[in-house]
Image (cartoon, coloured by chain):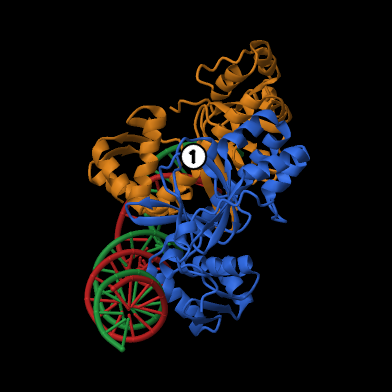
Chain colours: A blue, B orange, C green, D red
DNA sequence: ATCATAAAGTGACATCTATCATCATGTATT
DNA sequence: AATACATGATGATAGATGTCACTTTATGAT
């Protein structure tokens, strides 16, 4: 039923280091930074040293406290960045394909201050943080590009939180539902996270998140069959997001 | 009564370009980055091109939408970073001496996505963003240091918001009061912001912020005479911050 | 298929917060 | 001194959210 292969039959090849692969992501921002700033021969080199790894749904990619050795980039799938608090998990942000997973203080700290795990089966690109630091050190153009990209991503996360904090329950839940419609490019999709995770993302209780979704269903804004979501009245849902 | 000279008698010298001054801030992080990464003769050069400017209480330093031409650093005083929203001003963070004022997307956008104004009379150091970009471009050590510093500062702001969002009214207000005790290094201080600004900072209504302070006063946690605050029971206030 | 467990859903109620109205105080201006 | 205006303060009330209890449904493991 699920689009994703959740069985673990190939656990024995859990680390498929496919280093023979090319950097073949058409829209990879990192690749475009490489191509814009360093020689093509060198790009090839970095492509080779890059590791591509498959991670299964639920698998931990980064654990809070881990030493930062890698610079990680999401090629396919969906991940969540979160931290453990006395009140349970707090989701900092969701990462969609072509987002940096290594964010915030990758260049400012020795250890990660947050965890990352796969929401869907995903493919991540792993580069050595040392090599990236070396590149920043040696190549000014690359340094400027990467600092710009990271800055923008951090600001996006912060401002999303500032926006959310001004909304009430319904507006927050509407934001999440519309976010996924945007990620998938469709108004009908399989919700990749649980109600609990939505709650952890928007900072409300599980029960109230469920109530909000139920209310949208009753008001014919959504069709809901478990995780299957269809946004029927996008205009109204946007209005709720923007006004609540 | 106020510690600060609020009259505007010397408006005619509103831009005291004191370029003859040395970089004399003992703890200036930017200066220490300079000294750690570039030649001393060059440091002198940057010191000279630097502009030191006095800003009065309430004065706007950066306005949302302004083109980013400067890299700004707070030498003395206190500033607030905020943005205008349909719900009024939302304070993003407070900047204390030796904090960067230019944050977030200084290297990622053409224009500022937030405003900055002086809470107290302040002194800011202004460097050309072009020169800083040039330095990043030419000097790998400098690039790595500055990216690390900016990353850490951005993470601090984001995590402060994540922390606050998990607290209730009293915990949020306690956080602010303890923050200022930390900034001033004293349990007795003149609150530099209004109750309204505390509300805009912690995302609660003015009335409830006032009520929280009144409650702390009634419970003998604070002495309050208008803006004059004395934290009597630091332990209890910390407990409220950490548990609420 | 069966079981255990997590997730989804709902109602009742307690708690927290926003809003409105009102008043007091302080500050700046004339 | 008189005025206007922002700030500070408090009570009453409505509205929003959290918590608890419980049921149903879905999911995964045996």
Left-right relation of B137 to A120? right
Residue labelled with disc 1:
A68
Location of residue B70 by image quarter:
top right
Callout 1: 10 Å neighbours few (<14), some, many (20+)? some
Whether residue B50 is visible, yes or no, is yes
> Closest to the observer: B225 or A154?
A154
Secondary structure of residue under mark 1: loop
Estimate the x, y position of residue A204 in percent, counting from the top left. 41, 63
> Closest to the observer: A207 or B191?
A207
Against B190, is B238 above or below?
Answer: below
Against B67, is A203 above or below?
Answer: below
> Given the image, what chain letter belongs to the residue carrying mark 1?
A
Estimate the x, y position of residue A59 in percent, counting from the top left. 45, 58
**Count of picture labels:** 1
Task: Determine the residue positioned at 54% across, 22% down.
Answer: B28
> Closest to the observer: B130 or A61?
A61
Against C21, is B3 above or below?
Answer: above
Estimate the x, y position of residue A79 in percent, counting from the top left. 52, 58
Against A7, is C27 above or below?
Answer: above
Estimate the x, y position of residue A221 in percent, counting from the top left. 56, 80
């Amino acid at each position: 039923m699920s689009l994703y292969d959740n069985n673990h039959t190939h656990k024995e090849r859990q680390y498929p280091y496919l280093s023979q692969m090319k950097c073949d992501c058409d829209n990879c921002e990192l690749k475009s930074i490489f191509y814009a700033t360093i020689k093509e021969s060198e790009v090839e080199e970095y492509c080779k040293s890059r590791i591509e790894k498959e991670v299964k749904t639920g698998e931990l990619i980064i654990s809070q406290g881990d030493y930062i050795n890698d610079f990680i980039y999401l090629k396919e799938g969906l991940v969540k960045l979160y931290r453990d608090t006395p009140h349970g998990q707090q989701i900092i942000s969701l990462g969609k394909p072509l987002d940096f997973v290594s964010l915030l203080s990758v260049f400012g700290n020795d250890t990660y201050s947050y965890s990352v795990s796969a929401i869907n089966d995903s493919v991540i690109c792993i580069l050595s943080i040392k090599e990236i630091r070396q590149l920043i050190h040696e190549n000014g153009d690359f340094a400027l590009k990467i600092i710009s990209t990271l800055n923008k991503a951090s600001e996006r996360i912060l401002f999303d939180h500032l926006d959310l904090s001004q909304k009430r329950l319904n507006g927050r839940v509407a934001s999440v539902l519309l976010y996924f419609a945007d990620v998938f490019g469709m108004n009908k999709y399989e919700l990749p996270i649980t109600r609990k995770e939505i709650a952890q993302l928007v900072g409300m209780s599980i029960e109230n998140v469920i109530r909000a979704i139920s209310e949208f269903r009753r008001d014919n804004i959504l069709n809901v069959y478990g995780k299957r979501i269809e946004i029927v009245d996008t205009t109204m849902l946007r209005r709720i997001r923007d006004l609540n």
